[in-house]
Image: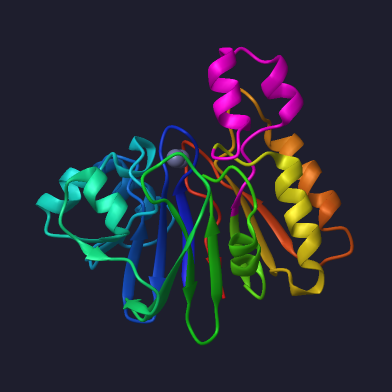
Amino acid sequence: MRFCSLASGSNGNATLVEGPDGPLLVDVGLSWREMTRRAARAGMSTTDLSWIVLTHEHSDHVRGLKTALRRGLRVAATQGTLRALGVDGIPLEPGLELAGITVTPFPVAHDAAQPVGLRLDTPDVRLALVTDLGRVTPEVLAAMRHCTHLLVEANHDTEMLLTGPYPWPLKMRILGPNGHLANEETARALARLGPDGPKTVLLAHLSRENNSPARALESVAGALNGSPAALYLTYPDRPSAVVCS
Ligand SMILES: [Zn+2]
Ligand SMILES: [Zn+2]
């Protein structure tokens, strides 16, 4: 398996995964054209793409969905997400196999209809995608355990958010139990994994206004203290490193 974040943040999210039997796209928060351009830039192909898995219906995750559907791609998502979008798709249920990958959703606390994080497992690789969540619940922590690779939200630095330019209600939404995960919460969750932690961590959905890559890296690197995990960033405007296993 190889994977790459093509975009991450409140302007658009998409992760391209190459499984044993072909590619799989998780979320399509970019225009189709931009998505394929970035995939090519990362040295990955979207030619054989036939499936998109959606985590939830927020626009930063579905912006390119209409075009994808017109091109004949099929969607897998929770019933709540499918209903909220008004599209036909197959229900995302544990045990679903796409592109040779076992796709397992788990609930996350976020202000959408039925949002999920995802475990994408092959015999050799166990990848957890954990973004758009207000808090780390036991289900989330369980999904993060024993994974080899983890793409996890580090949305904001709480101090920067509180003193930053956002209007108060938006600050409260982000900080709330169904909002987004702060650097320090991500760091705490990683610290709790201990020796069950992943060998690769990608920090995702960083806020441009309320975080900085340096702050996010610093918080999380502290929590990984002593662990040999490789730490990467994801970006709003370009692909991340391609992680191979
Ligand atoms: Zn989002
Ligand atoms: Zn969201």
Q: Which residues are the magenta region?
A: 152-178
Q: Nearer the viewer, residue 93 or 225?
A: 93
Residue 175 is a magenta residue: yes
- Quarter where residue 151 is shown: bottom right
The total of numbered circles placed on residues is 0
Q: Quadrant of residue 206?
A: top right
Q: Is 226 contained in the magenta span? A: no
Which residue lies at the image location 32% right of the left edge and 66% below the top edge? 92
- The x, y position of residue 189, in whole percent, is 73, 56
- 151 on left or right of 62: right
| Nearer to us in this view, 226 or 47 | 226
Question: Quick check: 145 left or right of 187?
Answer: left
For ligand 2, give the image quadrant. top left
Q: Position of residue 83 (x, y in %)?
A: 22, 49
Task: Please provide percent x and percent y for residue 96.
Answer: 34, 76
Residue at horizontal 60 percent and vertical 33 percent from the top: 176
Quadrant (top left, top right, bottom left, bottom right) of the C terminus: bottom right
In which quarter of the view is residue 218 placed?
top right
At 32% from the left and 48% from the top, the residue drawn is 28
Point out residue 196 in the picture as x, y percentages from the top left corner.
74, 74
Residue in the picture at 42% in, 32% down: 11
> In the displayed structure, would residue 85 be above or below residue 125?
above
Q: Residue furthest bottom?
A: 123
